Each structure stands twice: as C-alpha cells, then as structure tokens.
C-alpha cells in the first residue's frame, strides 16, 4: 500500500493553524492583562487604595498572565508543561539557595556602601560596638574600610593594644556604636 501524499497546500495547513492558535493565545493574554489593569485602575479611582499598592499588584498580575500565556504557547508547540514546571521549580530552588548563601556577603557590601556614603565614622576614628549597656564590645581605631570588613586596631588597655580586629560591616548597623573623632583624647589610649 502506498503512503498517501497530501498536496503541497494541505501540508501547510497544520503549521499555519498552530501559528494562528499561538497568535490567539498571545492576543488573549494581552487583552486579559489590559482588562485586569483597567479594572485595577477603576478600583483605585473608586476606592482609596494607595498607588504604592496598585502598581506592584498590576505588575505582578501582568507577569502572571503573560507567563501563563507563554506556557500555553509552549505547550501548544509541543513542550510538556510538566517538564516546564519541573525546570522552573528547580531553577527557583537553586536561586533561593544561592540567594540565602550570598545574603551575608550582600549585606556586608550594602553596609559598606552605606558606611562610605553616610559616614557614621571615618578612618582614624575610635569606634566601639556595644553589645549591651553593661558589657563592653569591640573597641578600636579604624584603620581600613573595605567592602566586607572594617579593620580596627584595639585601643591599648591593660597591655592588649595593637591587636587588629576585622569587624563585618553589617554589625555596625545591627548594634549600637560609640564613636570618638580622631582628635579626641580617649581614656585608656596612649
């Protein structure tokens, strides 16, 4: 038995039909997100919702609707939704783990930028990180500030001076800090 040969125009019907379906899905997604955005705008005009609430809500819903439309398009093109969700959830899990692993480094980098711009202390100042009111913390002269640590040389008290201590920058924003300018006379310092 011979294979049935379709005429050339009939071979193009299925790809064209899939293309039309893809365009309809994208158009439906676009119209849905526009309808939702207009509905949220009307809701914001009718009720006293702050714009700071409506703007992220509108953006989140837009991403959700267009992301769903993209998944429908990929599924129509033959990509399994199960494979997509598995890949997406794996990527999100790895990104979350990486974010939490980098959290302390990112925190120290941001605090370094704040130290440079806000200037809670400068090179040469004496600073003390106060643990509690009755318990003294780390105290020393600031000799270096980099993106992760601030280096202090401990004040000479009872023969313990000259020791260098590297304090993570984020601690300066988590604890109370006492500061003496470089020209001030500090008790216990020679």
Image (cartoon, rainbow, N blue to C red):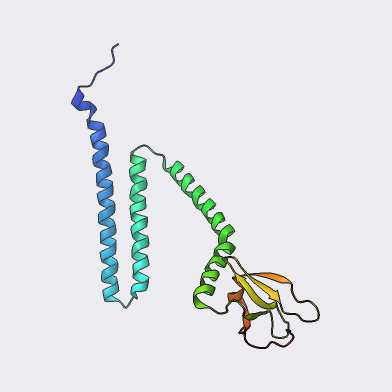
Where 5 sits versus 85, above or below? Answer: above
Where residue 31 sits, quadrant-wise, is: bottom left
How far across and how far down the image is residue 167, in percent? 65, 70
Q: Residue at x 46, y 48 (%)?
A: 88
Where 91 sits versus 108, above or below? Answer: above
Q: Residue furthest right?
A: 159
For the C terminus, the quadrant is: bottom right
Foreground residue among 161 and 66: 161
Foreground residue among 93 and 6: 93
For the N terminus, the quadrant is: top left
Q: Residue at x 23, y 35 (%)?
A: 16
Judge from the rendering whether residue 66 lies leftward or rightward of residue 128; answer left or right.
left
Q: Residue furthest top?
A: 1
Foreground residue among 64 and 190: 190
How far across and how far down the image is residue 37, in percent? 28, 63
Q: Residue at x 28, y 12 (%)?
A: 2
Where 5 sits versus 95, above or below? Answer: above
Judge from the rendering whether residue 79 lies leftward or rightward of residue 11; answer left or right.
right
Foreground residue among 86 and 140: 140
How far across and how far down the image is residue 96, in percent? 53, 56
Where residue 83 sits, quadrant-wise, is: top left
How far across and how far down the image is residue 26, in percent? 28, 48
Q: Residue at x 28, y 47 (%)?
A: 25
């Amino acid at each position: 038995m011979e294979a049935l040969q379709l005429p050339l125009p009939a071979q193009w019907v299925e790809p064209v039909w899939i293309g039309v379906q893809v365009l309809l899905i994208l158009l439906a997604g676009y119209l849905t997100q526009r309808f939702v955005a207009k509905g949220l705008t009307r809701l914001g005009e009718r009720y006293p919702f702050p714009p700071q609430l409506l703007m992220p809500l509108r953006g989140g819903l837009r991403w959700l609707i267009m992301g769903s439309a993209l998944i429908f398009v990929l599924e129509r093109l033959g990509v399994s939704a199960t494979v997509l969700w598995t890949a997406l959830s794996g990527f999100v899990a790895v990104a979350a783990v990486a974010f939490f692993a980098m959290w302390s480094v990112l925190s120290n980098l941001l605090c370094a930028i704040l130290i440079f711009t806000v200037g809670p202390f400068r090179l040469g100042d004496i600073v003390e990180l106060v643990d509690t009111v009755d318990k003294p913390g780390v105290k020393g002269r600031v000799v270096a500030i980099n993106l992760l640590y601030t280096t202090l040389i401990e004040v000479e008290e009872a023969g313990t001076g000259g020791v260098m201590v590297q304090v993570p920058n984020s601690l300066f924003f988590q604890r109370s800090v006492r500061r003496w300018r470089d020209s001030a006379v500090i008790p216990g310092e020679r």
